[in-house]
Image (cartoon, grey):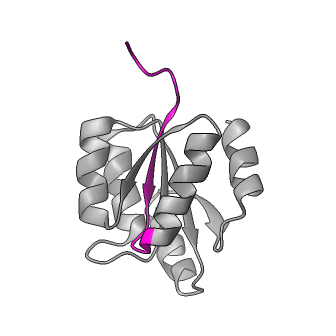
Amino acid sequence: MTDSRRSILVIDDEHIIADTLALILANAGFQPHIAYNGVSGLEIARAKKPEIVLSDVILPGMNGVELATQIRQILPGSRIILFSGQAVTADMLESAKESGEEFEVLAKPVDPEELLSKLRDS
């Protein structure tokens, strides 16, 4: 039996945030996968091939913009949404944009209703 729910990868080094978002998404009918850093996020993306990637920008080892760029190369059809609570990420996002990469961005803390609305619109 295959799972028909849309697959989503949640990446955040704050376990409580990643786990809570995954629970909210599971309750909304998605099939969540969780990673707590960029390296494991990339590994899970390769293995699970999620339709959607939801990642914090500030991550240990590999930031979310670098991660999103690499995931887009291996899964060009995946939708990538980044979120952050830090103003410093604007520079990272602008640098990515100058390199031809543009990502959707949500402010942290992520509002569950706003997130679900954004995901349902896709």
Q: Position of residue 39 (x, y in %)?
A: 24, 63
Residue sitting at x 43%, y 67%: 12
Residue drawn at 56 percent across, 57 percent down? 21
Question: Relative to 10, is 81 on the left or the right?
Answer: right
Q: Is residue 41 left or right of residue 101?
A: left
Asked if 92 appears above or below 112 in the picture, the reply is below
> Considering the image in quadrants, where does the N terminus appear?
top left
Q: Indicate whether 82 appears above or below 45.
A: below
| Quadrant housing the C terminus | top right
Q: Residue at x 66, y 66 (%)?
A: 110
Start and end of the magenta stretch?
1-15
Q: Position of residue 109 (x, y in %)?
A: 65, 73
92 w.r.t. 43: above or below: below
| Image quarter of residue 111 | bottom right
Residue 4 falls within the magenta-colored stretch: yes
Q: How many marks?
A: 0
Report x, y in % for residue 64: 41, 67
Question: Main SS of the magenta segment?
Answer: loop
Where 42 sits versus 89, above or below? above
